[in-house]
Image (cartoon, grey):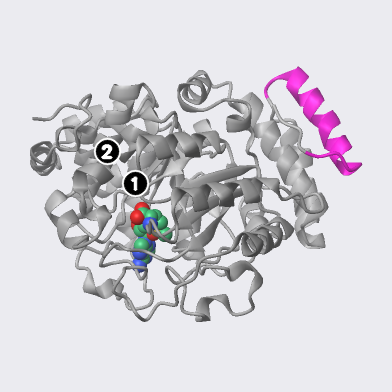
Amino acid sequence: MYNPKSQKAEEFISHEEILQTLAYAQENKENLPLIRDILDKARKGKGLSHREASVLLACENQDVIREIYALAEKIKTDYYGSRIVMFAPLYLSNYCINGCVYCPYHRGNSGVVRKKLTQEEIRRQVIALQDMGHKRLALEAGEDPLHNPIEYILESIQTIYSIQHKNGAIRRVNVNIAATTVENYRKLKEAGIGTYILFQETYHKESYEQLHPTGPKRDYAYHTEAMDRAMEGGIDDVGLGVLFGLERYAYEFAGLLMHAEHLEAAYGVGPHTISVPRIKRAEGIDPESFSNGIDDDTFAKICALIRIAVPYTGMIISTRENKAVRERVLRLGVSQISGGSRTTVGGYDTPLPEEDGSAQFDVSDQRTLDEVVRWLMELGYIPSFCTACYREGRTGDRFMSLCKSGQIQNCCHPNALMTLKEYLEDYASPETKAIGERLIAEQLDEIPSESVRAVAGAHLQKIEKGSRDFRF
Ligand code: SAM
């Protein structure tokens, strides 16, 4: 039976409820009065239920789709301004005992070169990342209790936070590792992680079991209830995602929103982020062999509807997507992107990283971080290297209430400008720096509070003279 408050996977992601939602969406996809009501509700900026959002997803009326896009753009601007948070993935180890059929790291794949970074190698990776200008990382690792036990992950986090190289520092480490125990989540929290990210891959239990034929990840309930255990372990910023292409997208979309509703209902705090990966080519993996791939228009519509349905949840896009797709979905709701990414283990300090056979997927956007930062500014965005919220204890429901009160504009906007200024001073090319300086000068006036504006202005001057790490 469907129960969003239940902590049982099969109750908060009820298969019957998803099937009924899909049937309801099909029945009503041309019901314009209902669709108008849903759009009116969405316009209030408080989100939509999985049923309402699913009706909009099913609707093929071009006028309605145009309205969806316009509304997503409006909500994106109202809630996130023009800030885009920057991050990079860091692959620690591709040893894995799971059998995920879509992932090149799966145990049976002898074509993949197995690697695990030593702490010294992690130091070199982090210095390379700091020299690019990164401040926020997403740690990635396969599941392997012998090669990658929790102690290895914890030690790696400690190493990463300890490295101060020139003016660089990694100030937020998000972690994307396999579902684990409450005790391990508690350890990750104590190690100072930002968001715990885990993709559901698919919400469809039967498909899930076929796609994960062997290994601990095969347990659908254990995987789906991971965020509940993370919450119990004290991690209140969690990141959801599905791997689009594995199952029918409408099923996944409803499941994803039901998962978000569950977190809100059970813990009073929705997901901090949602990621929207699509299957990519990789060693031994052909995306064409998965029959549920989605085209760019459907992908854009999904991103827009996630933005409308959960306005307070950040949305992440990786370099799995190319420049054109990234540009499109940035407008429609994406608030965090990676730049200069390497998906190989140890790829940040080796010359031909994608060719060593350890990559997780082919990178579509191969530009440097400097090129991505410049491109964003040319499009009118403010690339932000801010990591202030969790360092100021603004996580979980405290972060959400700040978002909901609108006060976030007086924190995020100046923090974005100050961290961009640090980037320009320490890492940018002359051309990027010139564009950035102009942007900061213009954007300073947009800080709503007069006193915050004055303090931010003073901090920007101090950054120019060599001080670092100011935050609201
Ligand atoms: N091993 C961890 C786990 O089991 O959740 C997470 C780390 S894995 C490196 C990160 C994510 O990459 C996976 O959750 C999956 O969604 C995604 N991924 C795997 N294979 C992929 C592929 N061929 N193309 C795109 N993304 C893929």
Neighbourhood count class around disc 2 (C-alpha, 10 Å): few under 14, some 14–19, many 20 upward: some
Q: Amino acid at mark 1?
A: Ala
Please give the name of the residue rendered at 77% of the width and 44% of the height, measured from the top-left corner: 421
| Quadrant housing the N terminus | top left
Q: Position of residue 219 (x, y in %)?
A: 21, 49
Q: Position of residue 456 (x, y in %)?
A: 78, 29
Residue 449 counted in the magenta span: yes
Q: Amino acid at mark 2?
A: Glu
**Dot label at residue 225:** 2
**Residue 95: which quarter of the image?**
bottom left
* Mark 1, residue position: 179
**Is residue 367 visible from the viewing direction of this image?**
no
Q: Are marks 1 and 2 in contact (CB under 8 Å)?
A: yes
Q: Position of residue 330 (x, y in %)?
A: 49, 50
Residue 245 counted in the magenta span: no
For disc 1, does the CB lie below 8 Å from ligand 1? Answer: yes
From this view, report whether residue 257 is shown above or below residue 219. Answer: above
| Quadrant housing the C terminus | top right
Q: Which residues are magenta?
A: 448-468
In the image, taking residue 459 as reference, residue 280 lies left or right, namely left
- In this view, the residue farthest toward the front is 146
Mark 2 residue element: loop
